[in-house]
Image (cartoon, rainbow, N blue to C red):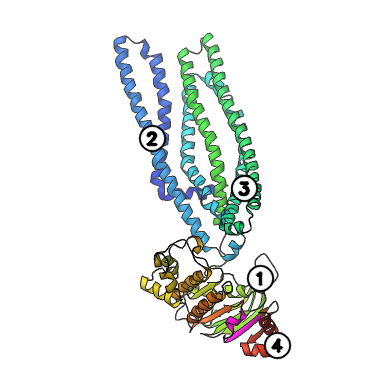
C-alpha cells in the first residue's frame, strides 16, 4: 500500500502550484468554520452585557467581520470546487494518456488473455474515481484534521471536563470505522471486478449483435447478461450492507456525542461549573465537529473506490511488454527483403506444447512464397513471428541477414505490410482508412493507392466518394470492398515485405478475382508470404511450403508438389 500511495502522490508533481493553493483554501475554509462560533460566543458572553450605546456598534462591526468571513469561505469553497476539480481532471487526463500509451506497447500475448470491456473499465470508470480521490482526498483530510483538532483545542480551553465528555466516544467510533473500512475495501474491489465483467459482456454482445440477431438468440444473450448483472447486484448489496452499517453507526455516534454534551453540560450548569454560554458554544462546535466526521464518512467510501481503482491501474502499468526494443536496436535501411528462419520454434507462454518446431526456410528478396496446410498447424503464427507480434521460443529470424530482435520494432513493422482475412476498418471515412497506411500521405497519393487496389471505381460510386463514412468496422461496405480498402492501405504504406493471411478465403468468386488481381499487383517485386485456403490462388507461387504438425513437410512449385503425390496433392484435390 505504501508504494501505491507514493506512486499516486507522484501525479501531483506537475500541478503542485494548484495543489498547494487548493490545500491553502481548504485550510482557510476550515479555519473560518472554527472562528465563527467563537465570534458568537464573544457576542453572547461579552457584547450583550455592554451598554446599548457600545453594544450596537460592536454587533455591527462583528456582523461585518462575519460577512467577510463568509465571503472568504465562499471563495475558498469555489476555488476547491472549481480549480481543485480541474486539477483532478488533469491528473485523470495524464493517467488515461499513460495507460492508453501502455496498452499500445503490450503485445498480442497480453490481448490474447484479456477482455476488451475490462480494459475499457480501467481507462474510464476506474480513472474517474481515482481523480475524485486525488482531488478531494487531501483537502478532506486537511479540512477534517483542522476542524477536529481545532475544535478539540478551543473546547478544551473553554471547558476541559465538557471536552472530555464530548470526545469520550471517539475511540469507540474509530474502532467501529476501522472494522467496516476493511470490509468495505474488499466489497468495493469485488464491485470493480464485476462491473468490468459486465462491460466486457456488453462489448462482446454489441460487437456481435448481427450474429445474435441472425440466430435469434436475444433471449440467450439476455440470460448471459442477467447472470453477470445478478452477480454485480449481489456484490453491490454486500458493499451497501457494509456501507449502511458504517453510515448508521457513525451517525449514531455523532448523535450520542451531542446527547452526552447536552446531558453533561446541563448537569454542569446546575452544579455551576459550566455556563449557559459555554454549553451553547459547545453545541455549536459539536456541529463543526460532526460535519468533518460526515465528510470523513464520504472520504472513506471515496478512498475505497479510488484506491481500489488505482490498484487496478497499477496492475496494468506493472505488466511489462514481453516484446520490446533490445538495447542498441537499429532502424532498417535500404531493405531488400531477404528473410530467413533458422531453426525457429515457438510455443505460447502458458503452454509447453510447440506450435512450430525447428522451422528452417529462406525467402530471397522479391520471392512469392505460399504457405498451405491443415487448419491449426501454425501458418498464421509463423507469419506473425516476422513482425514480432510474438517472440520466437528458440532459433532466429533474419531480415537481410540481421536478427529481427536487433531491429527497432517500429522500423521492423514499418517495412512489413499485412492483409488479413478479417479486415479491420476504423470509424471514419474511406479516405481516413486508406491514409491509415501512411498518415502523412496526400490526397493524390491516397487516390493512386486506391486505383492500384482496384478500389477507385467503387469508391467513386459511394454517396460522398472518398469522404463517405463507412460506419463501425466498415459495416456499410461489402466484404470485397473492405478487402480492397485494406489492400489500398498497404499500397500506400509501400513496404518491401508482404504477408497475405487468407486474404480472399471469405470472398465470393467475383470479389476474389478482383481482390486477387490487386494482391498480385501489390506483391510485384516484394518478398511475399501468402497463407492460402483456396490453393487455386497460389498455383503461380515461386515456392509453396506445406506445413503440418511435423513442420515443413513439403516444398516446391505447384507442378513439383503435384507430381510428388503427397500432402499437397491431397489438399489440392480436396480443394
The residue pinned by badge 4 equals: 565
User: In the picture shown, does residue 382 fall above or below 273?
Assistant: below
Q: Mark 1, mark 2: which one is toward the viewer?
A: 1
Instruction: State if disc 3 and disc 4 touch (CB < 8 Å).
Output: no
How busy is the neighbourhood of tag 2: few (under 14 within 10 Å), some, or many (20 plus)? many
The residue pinned by badge 3 equals: 194
Q: Is residue 71 or residue 414 the one in the foreground? A: 414
Mark 2–mark 3 distance (CA, rounded to whole Å): 39 Å
Badge 4 element: loop
Could you tell which of marks 4 and 3 lies nearer the N-terminus? 3
Query: Percent from the top left, x then y, of residue 429?
Result: 43, 64
How busy is the neighbourhood of tag 3: few (under 14 within 10 Å), some, or many (20 plus)? many
Badge 2 element: helix
Query: Percent from the top left, x then y, of residue 546?
Result: 65, 82
- Residue 315 seen in this snapshot: no
Could you tell which of marks 2 and 4 lies nearer the N-terminus? 2
Report the magenta residues as a range: 533-546
540 part of magenta stretch = yes
Amino acid at each position: 500500500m505504501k508504494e501505491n500511495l507514493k506512486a499516486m502522490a507522484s501525479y501531483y508533481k506537475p500541478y503542485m502550484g494548484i495543489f498547494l493553493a487548493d490545500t491553502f483554501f481548504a485550510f482557510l475554509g476550515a479555519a473560518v468554520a472554527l472562528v465563527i462560533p467563537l465570534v458568537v460566543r464573544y457576542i453572547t458572553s461579552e457584547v450583550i452585557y455592554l451598554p446599548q450605546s457600545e453594544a450596537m456598534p460592536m454587533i455591527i462591526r462583528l456582523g461585518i467581520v462575519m460577512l467577510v468571513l463568509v465571503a472568504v469561505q465562499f471563495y475558498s469553497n469555489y476555488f476547491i470546487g472549481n480549480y481543485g476539480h480541474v486539477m483532478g481532471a488533469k491528473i485523470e487526463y495524464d493517467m488515461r494518456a499513460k495507460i492508453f500509451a501502455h496498452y499500445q506497447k503490450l503485445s498480442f500475448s497480453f490481448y490474447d488473455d484479456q477482455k476488451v470491456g475490462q480494459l475499457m473499465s480501467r481507462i474510464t470508470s476506474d480513472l474517474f474515481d481515482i481523480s475524485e480521490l486525488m482531488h478531494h482526498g487531501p483537502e478532506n483530510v486537511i479540512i477534517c484534521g483542522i476542524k477536529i483538532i481545532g475544535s478539540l483545542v478551543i473546547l478544551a480551553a473553554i471547558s476541559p471536563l465538557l471536552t472530555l465528555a464530548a470526545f469520550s466516544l471517539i475511540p469507540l467510533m474509530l474502532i467501529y470505522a476501522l472494522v467496516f473500512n476493511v470490509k468495505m475495501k474488499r466489497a468495493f474491489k469485488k464491485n470493480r471486478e464485476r462491473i468490468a465483467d459486465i462491460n466486457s459482456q456488453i462489448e462482446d454482445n454489441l460487437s456481435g449483435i448481427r450474429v445474435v440477431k441472425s440466430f435469434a438468440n436475444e433471449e440467450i444473450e439476455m440470460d448471459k447478461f442477467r447472470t453477470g448483472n445478478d452477480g454485480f447486484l449481489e456484490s453491490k448489496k454486500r458493499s451497501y450492507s457494509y456501507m449502511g452499517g458504517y453510515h448508521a453507526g457513525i451517525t449514531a455516534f455523532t448523535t450520542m456525542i451531542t446527547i452526552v454534551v447536552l446531558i453533561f453540560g446541563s448537569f454542569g450548569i446546575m452544579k455551576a461549573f459550566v455556563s449557559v454560554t459555554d454549553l451553547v458554544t459547545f453545541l455549536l462546535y459539536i456541529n463543526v465537529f460532526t460535519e468533518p466526521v460526515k465528510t470523513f464518512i464520504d472520504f472513506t467510501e471515496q478512498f475505497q473506490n479510488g484506491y481500489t481503482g488505482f490498484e487496478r491501474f497499477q496492475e496494468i502499468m506493472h505488466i511489462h511488454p514481453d516484446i520490446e526494443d533490445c538495447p542498441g536496436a537499429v532502424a532498417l535501411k535500404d531493405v531488400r527483403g531477404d528473410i530467413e528462419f533458422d531453426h525457429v520454434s515457438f510455443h505460447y507462454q502458458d503452454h509447453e506444447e510447440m506450435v512450430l518446431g525447428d522451422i528452417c526456410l529462406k525467402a530471397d528478396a522479391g520471392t512469392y512464397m505460399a504457405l498451405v496446410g491443415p487448419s491449426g498447424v501454425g501458418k498464421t503464427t509463423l507469419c506473425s513471428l516476422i513482425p514480432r507480434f510474438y517472440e520466437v521460443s528458440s532459433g532466429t529470424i533474419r531480415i537481410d541477414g540481421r536478427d529481427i530482435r536487433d531491429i527497432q520494432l517500429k522500423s521492423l513493422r514499418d517495412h512489413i505490410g499485412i492483409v488479413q482475412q478479417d479486415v479491420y476498418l476504423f470509424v471514419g471515412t474511406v479516405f481516413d482508412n486508406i491514409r491509415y497506411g501512411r498518415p502523412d500521405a496526400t490526397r493524390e497519393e491516397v487516390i493512386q493507392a486506391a486505383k492500384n487496389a482496384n478500389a477507385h471505381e467503387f469508391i467513386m460510386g459511394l454517396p460522398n466518394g472518398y469522404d463517405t463514412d463507412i460506419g463501425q468496422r466498415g459495416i456499410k461496405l461489402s466484404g470485397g470492398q473492405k478487402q480492397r480498402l485494406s489492400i489500398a492501405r498497404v499500397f500506400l504504406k509501400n513496404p518491401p515485405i508482404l504477408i497475405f493471411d487468407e486474404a480472399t478465403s471469405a470472398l465470393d468468386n467475383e470479389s476474389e478475382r478482383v481482390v486477387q488481381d490487386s494482391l498480385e499487383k501489390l506483391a510485384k517485386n516484394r518478398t511475399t508470404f501468402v497463407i492460402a485456403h483456396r490453393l487455386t490462388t497460389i498455383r503461380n507461387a515461386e515456392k509453396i511450403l506445406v506445413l503440418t504438425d511435423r513442420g515443413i513437410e513439403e516444398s516446391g512449385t505447384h507442378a513439383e508438389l503435384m507430381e510428388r503425390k503427397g500432402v499437397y496433392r491431397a489438399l489440392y484435390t480436396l480443394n
